[in-house]
Image: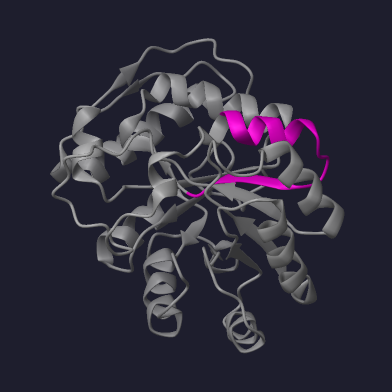
Amino acid sequence: MRIATTVFLTDETVRPAWLGRELERRGFAGLYLPEHTHIPVSRETPAPMGEPLPRPYGRTLDPFVALGQAAAVTERLGLGTGICLVAQHDPVGLAKSVATLDFLSGGRFTFGVGYGWNVEEAADHGTVWAERRELVRDRMALMRALWAEEPTAHQGPYASVRASLAYPKPVIRERPPGAPLTGPRTLIGGAAGPRLFAHIAAYADGWLPIGGGGLTEALPELRRVWADAGRDPAALEVVPYAVRPSPGKLAHYAALGVEEVVVQLPAGDETEILHTLDACARYL
């Protein structure tokens, strides 16, 4: 099983280049970074992780800039967003950022996508909260048009783009015949449910379940929706995210067919990070 990591990197924590080198030197599989552009001080949305909202949420580094720094000093380490708030981005610019990072890292990028929880943050980007899931789906389709080998137009309910020259392209990812996807490996985060599973089957390579709880009950339904959409059952990827690991938990994931787990690191200094890495090293 591959053991990757996630952490809230901020202006008060270690730098991504240092962390990337330490992870690769120890044999960890990857580094996933979260995204928040800002946290409005006046906020009615309850934080799903509990109040008060932890300090790092309002201080996160831009994940694409930070992952680019980590990519520059590593050769094998996987790089991912966990997650990117697609509804808060211009899709043409985001397509360029994703393609550039994947191209420069030699195809090491995983596009972790999510819908967000902070209504006020999304509203400042002009996002209509009730429409955010369909908005993300449309923006993903637009980005894939720009990533296509031949100039391809997209006309959707929320955005459009002319057939265009758009380079660099993401590194070509081998997928089973008939998979309706282009671009980097794409995983969608979110709580189990019919809408989420339908979107995963429509435009992703798999699921990024936060915390990894409830998989025994959820996976049969996701696999059914995936198969009903005509997707190859063997191609579905499920990557438990922000996990506090234990031998029993990892054995349980392995029995479910999970091949990668993302463990949570503290948003701290070098001493705290290294202590956690040393504790997790026994699972490598």
Magenta residues, start to end: 65-82
> Is residue 197 shown above or below 178?
below
**69 in the magenta segment:** yes
Looking at the rendering, in which quadrant would you find the N terminus? bottom right
Residue 145 position, x and y percent, is: 45, 26
Residue 141 position, x and y percent, is: 39, 33
- Residue 107, picture quadrant: top right
Residue 170 visible, this angle:
no
- Residue 64, picture quadrant: top right
Snapshot colouring: one colour
Residue at the spot x=38%, y=84% of the render? Answer: 217
Left or right of 221? Residue 109 is right
Residue at the spot x=50%, y=58% of the render? Answer: 206
> Is residue 226 shown above or below 151?
below
**Front position in the image: 120 or 257:** 120
**Front position in the image: 145 or 55:** 55
Residue at the spot x=48%, y=46% of the render? Answer: 34
Residue 198 position, x and y percent, is: 32, 58
Residue 61 position, x and y percent, is: 51, 35
Left or right of 78? Residue 223 is left
Residue at the spot x=31%, y=35% of the render? Answer: 87
- Residue 51, picture quadrant: bottom left
How many numbered tags mark residues here? Answer: 0
Residue 103 visible, this angle:
yes
Looking at the rendering, in which quadrant would you find the C terminus? bottom right
**192 in the magenta segment:** no
Left or right of 48? Residue 4 is right
**Front position in the image: 252 or 23:** 23
Residue farthest toward the right in the current orientation of the protein: 25
